[in-house]
Image (cartoon, rainbow, N blue to C red):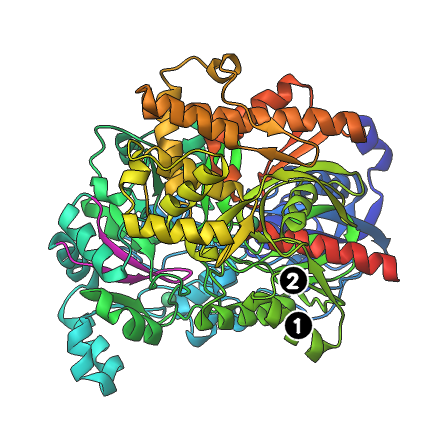
Amino acid sequence: MGAVAIATSGTQVREAARIRGGVQGVGFRPFVHGLAVALDLAGHVGNDTGGVFLEVEGDAADVADFFTALTRDAPARARIESVDRTVVPLQRTGAFSIVDSAPASRGGVGGGMHALVQPDIAVCDACLAELRDPADRRFGYPFINCSHCGPRYTIVHALPYDRAATTMAAFTMCDTCRAEYDTPAHRRFHAQPNACPACGPRLWFEVPTALATAQNSNAVAAETTLRLDDPIVRALRCLADDGTVAVKGIGGVHLACSATSTAAIARLRARKQRPHKPLAVMVADIDTARCCANLSPDECALLDAAERPIVLVRARDDSPLAALVAPGQDVVGLMLPYTPLHHLLLARGPLVMTSGNLSDEPIAFTNEDARTRLGSLCDGLLLHDREIAMPCDDSVLRIAERQLLPLRRSRGYAPYPVPLAAAVPPVLGIGGELKSTMCLTRDAHAFLSPHIGDVGGLETRALLQRTVEQLSRLLDVRPVRVACDAHPGYASAALARAWATVHNVPVTVVQHHHAHVASLMAEHGIVDERVIGVAFDGTGYGSDGTIWGGEVLVANYVGFDRVTHLACTWLPGGDAAVKHPARVALAQLQAAGISWDDDLEVVAASSRELQRVLAQQLQRGTNCVASSSMGRWFDAVAALLGVRHQVTYEGQAAIELEALAARAAGRYPADDAETDGRYRFALESDQFDGAPVLRAIVEDLRTGVETGMIAWRAHAAVADAVARIAVRVRHSHGLHAVGLTGGVFQNTLLLSMTCARLHAQDFRVLTHHKVPPNDGGLALGQAMIAAAQQARTR
Ligand code: ZN
Ligand code: ZN
Ligand code: FE
């Protein structure tokens, strides 16, 4: 090091550099400024659509040190993807400066549209300290932020990320804020959402009914309210009275109520028409989280991460949370506060924080939306005047096998790209129908949108459309092809076709489970290798017109072979069967040759009339759809065990069955299923049949075996079947990588059991860590398949 410095000492150089990646909105320019000043270098730094550009001039050794420190000491939230350096002529100017953002490339090294939009970041410790400091001018101010934290994606209209291109453009900074914003060494230097009580957004509390009578003067009413009373105090009072408060946050409006009061939750559930589906709970800190759940170190770290996702964790028996938060479940969705407002609201105990919507509608994100759509669901609205440019729901993750398992990839993660192994043509994957997201590719990046929802609804479809337009504009991607699901009834597919017509690009129709497998391959950086793709889910349109869902495919991005699948059974009433696991169970019993005897609870619970109609339907196949769905198979087992005969939300029976089995898993030997030869799927040449397992279950029920044990054995039977199938396909196709995907693999017990059996057979096992195994990941797979097709047609 010393020798280098001596050898180059006195030599003056000037270098231009371009830094690509997630380097805007994370305090990168102040960092560069500080570094340059410390090393006594001249030059400048700025943002543009290509990322960060800079030039430094000075002693050659110092310039070298500068670049070393640039990547080594970069701000924690920065993600540097590349630093391209070129030597440029000396300019012999004095100081180092931060220059205005340029819309196009400047500096010595070319730009292009390569900047990444930052996700929203949880409030940082420095800002929190100010929030709680009575002497600070931002004491108690709910919109406190700095260049290390605060909203990003949800306030951006365009790139580069500058105040004028955000919804903060509506607020003119006061002199004090302006001075912070202009001072390179300040923590708020160029913090675009910078604000204070004197100049920034305001919070107010509204009573929905009062509003109805004074509808034409909302703004005035809000102003008056603000002066009359502290909105936080009013909201806390309302929550303490078991009320529901609609809280406008960063990416949308939550419905909040006390998480320890059964009455409060019952009220919210009744209003939201959501009797059982688990509700997320926000707790003040990790210590409170520990009182509610048994947390592993990985789970603590994830809860505390800047993304602040909802983490599904194992609830404690002595948890202070009301059981009504997640009835029938062992797990509870916890998250920590991520906005200053949340910290103020959490003062008096954990809160249920659920998306502000009616079932299946998108999250409300404008004040008007909150008033009209949520007014009847709440007792008060805590609103503010900072607009949300794009809504963004909370993310939901689990830790499985000590790794991340995303169930919903949204706030904090989107629109950060999933890195691809190689550059692909720009395409659009429109996604599926439920839990939908969309995906755009640009170079070696796949940008997945935040969670959009069930596109069957009109409002959600409009949001999907808006997201496609906004993200393609923001990222400057003009897709040359669009991909959609093969289901003829999907609204998303219709939207994709309409979009393709307007933009005059071809459509790639992608089989549902092929897309699941491709999404898994993409997140593992697989380029053109074939894998054994095990895609187990509830419903996907099959290439033969039947409903698939228990599929083993040998696939790459170009195509797939359906090597085997769960034996088909009738789904009485088609998709309606999803709501009635008992009917699915009766159909599967019949298919397995087990008569409907009254000693089976599921039979006894079904009326004679229903049995008569079902028997007729199944015999003739009228109003029935053939299905190989593994999701429905688990539903049937759940109904057989009396876990649940009807469901009120997707996957409910399977989730409760998993809980039952997981409780047993703690008490029974891990190798039980391997010694129990009765619990084995029958492997045939092109299908595997669950009938023998159902017969074993019925036998165990009749001999009084505990249902937890049976549930556990049923899980083990599926894991065992996957491993045996994989061994077969390895022999026939010479493949060693097995991918586990589809909504069924949200079941972490099944996931662990299957991974263990596959690892024991020396397979390379691929599971989801970046995108969800459920339909929230479909868009990525669709995009990869469309990109592969596009690459071949060029
Ligand atoms: Zn901060
Ligand atoms: Zn100010
Ligand atoms: Fe699916």
Where is residue 721? Give x, y as percent. 59, 27
Secondary structure found at label 2: strand
Res. 467 in view: no
Q: Earlier in the sequence, mark 2 or mark 1?
A: 2
Which residue type does callout 2 highlight? Answer: Cys
Pointer 1 residue Cβ closer than 8 Å to ligand 3? no
- Which residue is depicted at the point 83% across and 41% down? 10
Q: Are marks 2 and 1 in contact (CB under 8 Å)?
A: yes
Residue 786 percent coordinates (x, y) = 74, 58
The residue depicted at 43 percent of the width and 68 percent of the height is 388
Where is residue 738? Give x, y as percent: 68, 32
Q: Residue at x 64, y 68 (%)?
A: 472
Residue that mark 2 sits on: 484
Residue at 80%, 51% in the rendered image: 15
Q: Quadrant for residue 549, please give it.
A: top right
Q: Secondary structure at mark 1?
A: helix
Residue that badge 1 annotates: 497
465, 343: nearer the viewer: 465
The reply to whether residue 176 is visible in this rendering is: yes
Q: Which residues are magenta?
A: 242-259
